[in-house]
Image (cartoon, grey):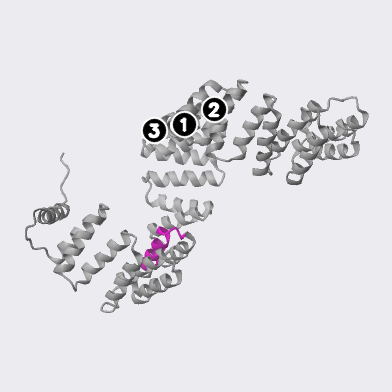
Amino acid sequence: MKNEINPYEEEMRNVVHRFENMMENNVRSYFGESECAEVIDFYLHNKNLRSASKATEFAKKMYPHSTLIRIRKVYVLINKGEHNEALFELEEIEKKEKSNLEIHFLKGNVHLSLGNFNESIREFKQISTQNPDDKSYVLYSIGLAFSQKKKFEKALKYFVKAHNFDKKNFYVIYEMGFCYEKTKQPAKALECYLQYVGQYPFDNFIWGNIARMYLATGNSEKALEAIEFALALNPKFAFMYYLKGNILAAQENYPKAIECYSEYLNLKPNFAIGHFAIAECYEKNEQFAKAFDEYHKTVTLAPKYASAWTGMGMCLFRFQKYAESIHYLKRAIKISKRADHFCVLGQSYLRLWLLDKAEKYLRRTVKLDPHFFLYWVIYSEVFFFQGNIDKAVLVLQKGYDYNSESAALNYRLAAYLFLIDLRDSGFYHLEKALKLNFELLETFWDVYDCKKDSGIRKLVRKYSSKK
């Protein structure tokens, strides 16, 4: 069955074709005022601003006093980013058309684009005052204007007001959900999206939104259910496969996660993020050769994907190919000065016993992110391996200032302190570590293997009985 032709669209295309023929061949042709407006709208809709400008100039010559054409000129100026010129034009039109609501709406939008929020709100309130019988629609329109400018908190106020006037307007409910999401209120966003899907249950995108909000509120099982609904409605909804993969990866179900990411790549074959996600799954599953291949595919598609360069370096590190890993890790830090990139590079130099370089990169690591305890522990090892326990202690004492509640850091600091016979301080940090996490005690013995020490055994027994 052939698609039916929309008579209005066909007529509009004929008008546009006639206009273009006139401009190309320099022939005279008559266009009514509404036809001129249609031509301009057509070009604006298709983002052809050059042709929209030409059509506007032509229309102004034919209808110099037409409010319809002058307003179209405003739309062209707004789309070109010429907001001050658009505002001037609107103020000129307003002198003759004070009760035209579209003028106030456009002025409100232009002021919004210029950052004149008070003036913008004043214009929007004019609409509400002049059109009291349809306040819900007016408030909804104002909310949309703020939302389109990413002023979501202001938009939300108007959507809530619109909702109070009309509880059954599901477009308002959807926009409320969107703004709640953007203002990091996922529980409220979820409530709105669930109301909306009750009215429009076959909207696969809303099921996608619901899945994301369930995930944001910590309910991964409900998120998976919503994803299944979305995929049942649209099996080619690529992002849902990616989101499902993320949930399964977080549950450490790496084989199933890889299946989902592979489905995502079948639909989005050139998206580097899909290969990166698969690589992470392989790496966490200790399949480092496969992980390396997927990281390599990632940087082939996205050469500035720093984490993928680090991923390749880490895979080589796992294979104890420390010298080879350095090339990839240096590529990563040229792109992104992230602490984790510097840390892995520092560790590679540490394994190669290039201690000056290891210290340089690990010092930079803790400076970039002093609140991650493991960076301090790794940094301390530069001095520990040299036998400079005093310096290792100083490093961890500084790290303790940022991470006093880290059991791992306290165990390591306690071990170092016992090694240099600072027993009082050692007992303090060991007891604190035992209180925080008894299960990590083995990390203490790995460094200070002195299980015959009666004082330490007594303290350990005290907390082992409390397990």
Residue drawn at (54%, 34%) of the image: 332
Left or right, residue 247 beside residue 438: left
Q: Quadrant of the C terminus?
A: top right
Q: Does the magenta stretch include residue 450?
A: no
Assess disc 1: are there few (<14), some (14-19) or many (≥20) residues with their C-alpha within 10 Å of its C-alpha: many
Left or right, residue 426 beside residue 105: right
Quadrant location of residue 131? bottom left
In the image, 358 versus 340, the foreground residue is 358
Assess disc 3: are there few (<14), some (14-19) or many (≥20) residues with their C-alpha within 10 Å of its C-alpha: some
Q: Which of marks 1 and 2 is nearer the N terminus?
A: 1
Q: Give coordinates of residue 453: x percent, y percent.
A: 91, 27
Q: Earlier in the sequence, mark 3 or mark 2?
A: 3
- The CA distance from mark 3 to mark 2 is 19 Å
Tag 3 near tag 2, CB within 8 Å: no
The residue where tag 3 is placed is: 270
User: Magenta region's main secondary structure?
Assistant: helix
Tell me the SS state at disc 2: helix
* Three-letter residue code for mark 3: Asn
Q: Give coordinates of residue 437: x percent, y percent.
A: 76, 36
- Highlighted range, magenta: 136-151
Tag 1 near tag 2, CB within 8 Å: yes
Q: Is residue 178 visible?
A: yes
Left or right, residue 394 beside residue 40: right
The residue where tag 1 is placed is: 299
* Three-letter residue code for mark 1: Val
Residue drawn at (45%, 68%) of the image: 117
The residue where tag 2 is placed is: 312
Residue 247 against residue 164 in the figure, above or below: above
Residue 389 against residue 191 in the figure, above or below: above
- The CA distance from mark 1 to mark 3 is 11 Å
* Three-letter residue code for mark 2: Met
In the image, 55 versus 364, the foreground residue is 364
